[in-house]
Structures are given as C-alpha cells and as structure tokens.
Amino acid sequence: MTVTVFILSLLAAMAIGMPIAYALLVCGLTLMGYLSLTSGLVTFDSQILAQRFVDGADNFPLLAVPFFLLAGEFMNAGGLSRRIVNLAMAWVGHFRGGLGYVTVIAAVIMASLSGSAVADTAALAALLIPMMRAAGYNIGRASGLIASGGIIAPVIPPSIGMIIFGVAGNVSITKLFLAGIVPGILMGVAIGMTWWWVAKRENVPAGPRVSMPDRLKITAEGGFALALPVLIIGGMKFGVFTPTEAAVVAAVYSFVVGMFIYRELKFKALYSLILSAGKTTAVVMFLVAAAMVSAWLITVANIPTEVANMLSPFMDNKILLMFVMMVLIVIVGTALDFTPTVLILTPVLMPVVLKAGIDPVYFGVMFIMNNAIGLITPPVGTVLNVVCGVAKISMDDAFKGVLPFLLAQLAVLFLLVLFPSIVLVPLQWWMR
C-alpha cells in the first residue's frame, strides 16, 4: 500500500501541472502523513521536512555541478566547441555523409568536456544544422543524429548525471566516471555505424576534402580543446584531484583558453554566462533537495523492501534482474526527465541492486545510460525538443529521424546487460 501511496501522490501532483521538484515535496508530505496515521514510523512535522530539504543540498560532491555547467558555458562561448567541430570536419567531412561523422566525433569529444546533454546538443545543432541544411541533408534525420549524439554526454566523464547518482546512491563518483568511458564510446560507435547505413541507403552527399596542411593547422588550433578531457580523466585516474576539483579545473581551464588563447570569450559576456549556469544549477539543486526528502521517507517506509519482494522471482539471476530493471527505467524515462528519474528511482532500486550482489558502479553506468536514452524518447524527450527548436522541425519529424539511432543505443544498452564485463574489466584497469 505504501508503494501505491507514493506513486499515486507523485503522479497526481504531476498531473495537475505541478513542477517535478514541488511534486516530490508533495509526495514527501503525503508519505509522511500516511505513515504518521497508519504505522507511527514518523510524526508529521514540517520542520523535519525542512531539515531534510536543506540536508539534501548540503553535499560537497554536488559542488561539481555548477562548475561543470560553467565550464560548458565557457567552452561554447570561448570557441572550444566550434574548434572541435572544425577538427572533425577537416578529417572526415569529405566522406559520404561526412557531416554525420563529424557530428558523432564532435559529440563524443564534447561529451568529455561538459557532461550536459542539453548543452552539447544545443551547441552541435547550432553549429551543424545550418551546414547540413545547406549541403542538402534530410534535416529530420540530421536532427535525430545530433540528438542521439548529444545523449552521450551523461555517460562519458565528466557527467553531471553521474554526480547526482553518486550522491543519491552513495557510490564513488570517480569510479562512475572511469566506468562510463567505454560505454560512452560504444554509444558513439553504434550511432556512427547506423549513420553509415543510413548515409548509404539515403545517398547522403559528401563534403569537400580539406588539404593536409589545413588539416594539421586546424588540429593544432583545436589542441587546447582536446587537452581538457585528457587533463580531467588523467587527473582523476592518478589521484591528482577529485571529481569536484576536476570541475573547478575544467571551468578555470576553459575560461583561460577561451579568454586568453582563442580570445573569443569576452568580459562583457561573463555575467550572462555565469547567470545562465547559476539558473541551471538552481533548478538541479532544488530538484536534488526535494528528492532527498522523498528518498528519506522512502527508506523509512521500507519501500525498497517492497520493491525487492516484487522483484524476488528475478533475484537469483543477475542478468534477468538487470533486464527487468532496464525495461522499467526505459518506460519511466519516456514520461520523466533525466534528473527526476535518477533522483526518484535511485533510492528505490539501489537496495535491490545491493541485495542481488550487482556491482553498484556497473548499475550506475547502466542506469545513467538508460536515463540518457530517455532524453530522446517522446513525449518528454528534452534533447529531442532542443534539437526541434534549433532546427525548426516538428517532434514527429525529429522522432522519425532519431528512431534508427535510438534503436542502436538500446542495442548497446542491452549488450552491456548481457556482458557486464565490457564495463567492469576496463574499470578494473583504470583503477590500477
């Protein structure tokens, strides 16, 4: 019955148009009232809710969120993102469907810089959609490719989603970051192979070839942008800094490169960039704080045990249990945005994962990948909405365009369900 009260109160609040953060608070109030009336596990007290709300945001690792968001703003305004696209264009733009391969390569590289799917997608779409339209590409298909490339950002480090999951699930963020490298690259390979098939089938045109001297010049110009992911990943692997400190390094590095090396980041733009990162941070932190209220009551109400009992027929088979949970998350991801899904399901599923003996880092990577895929599934599909806005196309056209790439991403997800060693073996090497 407690699970029913939790689900119905959350859905009812969302159904009347209440923002997710407030819906989570309403859900917490409802659970507290129900528990105080039926079981006496807690006493209804608004001060407890306020305390849990404050405690939810009072977490040092979450400090990485504003700095990674600020780094993303600096990268886009400072010319780092554009140089990554130019670099990919110089080397693969002359192939059939070359702009598509540019999208895939740029998406993987940019994912290792910002960690935000929405920011990466907006930057890629703004840079590439006009070029694809001028080259005669099918814009629906091109938009679908850009959207599917954008969702690699939450998987490859630095990932804001993994920071939130790590805090909510008490899992090492450094291990999550390192474990996400191979799955993120596999997502890029999958959509690259799918684009090869699409480009061949739809006879997508090729672009002009860039001379070798120009290629080398463009590569040299993009060197400072390419150095950032090496700096972040290398620094964490060798213990030079924590993920939170890596966020500060990324922000400072992107500021220095954009301001003093590329000289495209202007002082007059700093206020608006910092304000934009601050607004996004406020949304994320409010969600986290509100979710921690519900998470505490979920634990008090013993909802994870009830869910574990529901999943008990699958507990003896880790692969089957993972498959069932992944299907559940795919379904939830079509209706909820990325961050709320992470915050709502993490406290419910993590006890089940630990009881079944599944590696929590492996589950975290799979969970984040699954939620990232939810960003390109309607009706919510935040990333799909972003690319629709930039390309000025309908959601129907964008979904038709993204469908083959969505299926490719799902194929990678379930490949990793069947073969967990693809995630765990590279992690063990990284952690040496």
Image (cartoon, rainbow, N blue to C red):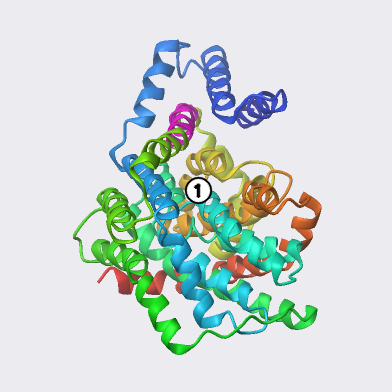
Residue neighbourhood size for the residue with mark 1, other residues' Cα within 10 Å, grouped as few (<14), some (14–19), many (≥20): many
Tell me if residue 371 can be seen.
Answer: yes
Please, which residue is most extreme toward the bottom here? 212
Foreground: 15 or 202?
A: 202
* Magenta stretch, residue numbers: 281-297
The residue identified by callout 1 is 352
User: In what quadrant of the picture does the N terminus appear?
Assistant: top right
The location of residue 124, given as percent across then percent down, is: 56, 60
Query: For residue 267, which quarter of the picture?
Result: top left
Residue 236 versus residue 395 in the image, above or below: below
User: Would you say residue 293 sits in the magenta stretch?
Assistant: yes
Residue type marked 1: Val
Task: Look at 57% across and 86% down and name the residue there.
Answer: 209
In terms of secondary structure, where does tag 1 sit?
Answer: helix
Foreground: 370 or 69?
A: 69
Tell me if residue 419 can be seen.
Answer: no
Foreground: 333 or 319?
A: 333
Residue 257 versus residue 329 in the image, above or below: below
Task: Look at 31% across and 51% down and name the residue there.
Answer: 255
The location of residue 70, given as percent across then percent down, is: 38, 45
Task: Look at 69% across and 25% down and name the residue there.
Answer: 17
Query: For residue 24, which quarter of the picture?
Result: top right
Task: Look at 58% across and 63% down and name the residue there.
Answer: 149
Residue 160 versus residue 413 in the image, above or below: above
